[in-house]
Amino acid sequence: MMEKWYISPNVVLREEADEWGILFDADTGASVALNPVAVSMFKAMQHSQDIAVVEKKVREEYEDIPETLTEDIEEFVNSLVQGGFVGFEV
């Protein structure tokens, strides 16, 4: 089970017309491109700190989901933590 995460307050998601997105941290100037599935995951993360909720949203939006989705979400969250976009509650 993962710790509860929070999204850094200065992080903004900019969605592009092709369903891709860019996360931007106004404090650090860091940015990262997100594919459409990652955009879906991030948007779900904004509303819930529960991986099951994020997983449900992805499964509702996409077909042919890999069995490793839970692990993929955990890896995504951890990559955002490493990039400074997300933190874990203490």
Image (cartoon, helix red, strand yellow):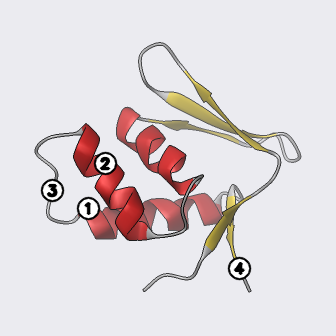
Tell me: 27 left or right of 56: right
Where in the figure is residue 12, as x and y percent of width and height?
A: 72, 38
Task: Please name the residue that numbered disc 1 is placed on.
Answer: 69
Badge 2 element: helix
Instruction: Determine contact: label 2, label 1, CB under 8 Å.
Output: yes
- The disc labelled 2 sits on which kind of residue? Val
Distance Cα–Cα, label 3 vs label 2:
11 Å
Q: Is residue 14 above or below residue 85?
A: above
- In the displayed structure, 29 sits above or below 71; it is above
Residue occupying the point 59% across, 58% down: 80
Q: In the image, residue 66 lies at what x, y percent?
A: 15, 56
Between circles 3 and 2, the one closer to the viewer is 2
Q: Residue furthest top?
A: 17
N-terminal of the pair, mark 2 or mark 1, is 2
Judged from the image, the secondary structure of the residue bearing numbered disc 3 is loop
Foreground label between 2 and 1: 2
| 3 or 2: tag closer to the N-terminus | 2
Q: Secondary structure at mark 4?
A: loop
- At x 44%, y 49%, the residue is 41
Instruction: Give whichever of discs 2 and 4 has the lower sequence position.
Output: 2
Sequence-first tag of 4 and 1? 1
> CA separation, marks 3 and 1?
6 Å
Give coordinates of residue 86: x percent, y percent: 67, 61
Find out whether the residues at labels 3 and 1 contact each other: C-beta distance under 8 Å. Answer: yes
Judged by depth in the image, the label closer to the viewer, 3 or 4, is 4
Residue 53 vertical position relative to residue 25 in the rendered view, above or below: below
Please name the residue that numbered disc 3 is placed on: 66
- What residue is disc 4 on? 89
Circle on res. 58: 2
Name the element at disc 1.
Answer: helix
Q: Residue furthest left?
A: 64
